[in-house]
Amino acid sequence: MKESTESFDSASEILCDELRELAARIPENKKAEIQELRLRIGKPLTLTDGTSAMFADSTGRVLYSMSEKAFVTTRRHVYDTFRRLCGYSVYSYQEEIKNGFITVKGGHRVGLCGTASVKDGKLSAVSDISSLNIRISRQMIGCANELIKELCPLSGGLLIAGAPSTGKTTLLRDLARSLSIGNGCRIMRTAVIDERGELSGTYQGTAFNDLGLCDIFNGYPKGEGIMHAVRSMSPQVIICDELGDEEDCRAAAQGFNSGAAVIASIHASSIDELKRRPQMKALLRTGAFKTAAVLSSPDRPCKISELIQIS
């Protein structure tokens, strides 16, 4: 319980003063369950536990339906939290803002929503931030133990598929830690390509999540990170989060062709859904992934419903 509430308290540190005080009054048992804090101008502060949306009144009491007692987030709350999030230097975070999220100390990721500026058909900037979504990063030590028993000795790539909030990143994080220190397997040289900083929780050069003996490539695009890892660290395992487009898929294939086992996650609630995507069909044909683990549901994070041989 303590570890779970510490994650909530760490994430709520980026809130403005009034919201931070409100968050501190939320009951401990709810702090351990909450996965997201969502701020929208003129709307109630919304808390998500992975399966349902909740709200809070000014005393921190959790409400399970919309109510006039729900605490409403103002423009000032969003603006002050946003400035605090950027260390009061919004200009220095323009690239992250344009990409739609900022990763903060502890590995918590804050999604941003606002008004886009478009130049030559491409997004050039985002201003007038109207919504913030704080995704609370939690480390579940040991959540990969059962998967490691099934897979080790590791002889091929692993694709972790699941719907949002099913624990893909959390499971990857524990896999990275376990493989790199030999927890339930032999020690393997493990490189983590942490494009968004969520896996390691790296902040100002320090990783706040325990990734064991991993070599962490923080902020690298997947393709560049994989090639840098191959050239400089001769990894036996390469781990990255959220394969999405064709470029990500090509990057995974590059890792496989280097001789490393690639472990990655992807948004898909089933193998059938995965195979329907054209870029995934091409990826699966490369042979980069031998096994797919399909995660269960948001109310059972990191639990595997299917383990399937795909090559």
Image: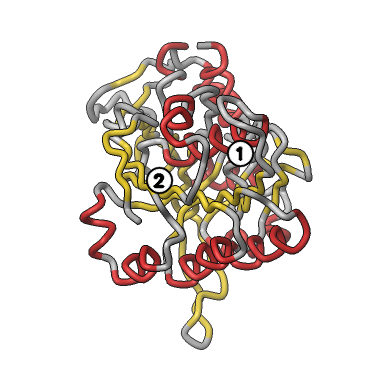
> In this picture, is 119 found above or below 277?
below
> In this picture, is 256 found above or below 125?
above
Q: Which residue is mark 1?
A: 107
- Name the residue rendered at 56%, 67% in the picture: 254
- Disc 2 is placed on an element classified as strand
- Name the residue rendered at 50%, 46% in the picture: 155
Q: Residues within 10 Å of mark 1 (few under 14, many from 20)?
A: many
Q: Residues within 10 Å of mark 2 (few under 14, many from 20)?
A: many
Q: Nearer the viewer, residue 60 or 245?
A: 245
Q: Which residue is mark 2?
A: 160
Q: Nearer the viewer, residue 308 or 221?
A: 308
User: Mark 1 to mark 2: distance in Å?
Assistant: 20 Å
Q: Is residue 297 visible?
A: no
x, y percent for residue 225: 66, 61
Determine which quarter of the picture holds residue 85: top right
- Disc 1 is placed on an element classified as loop
Q: Does residue 151 appear left or right of residue 164 in this picture? A: right
Quadrant containing the C terminus is bottom left
x, y percent for residue 125: 56, 70
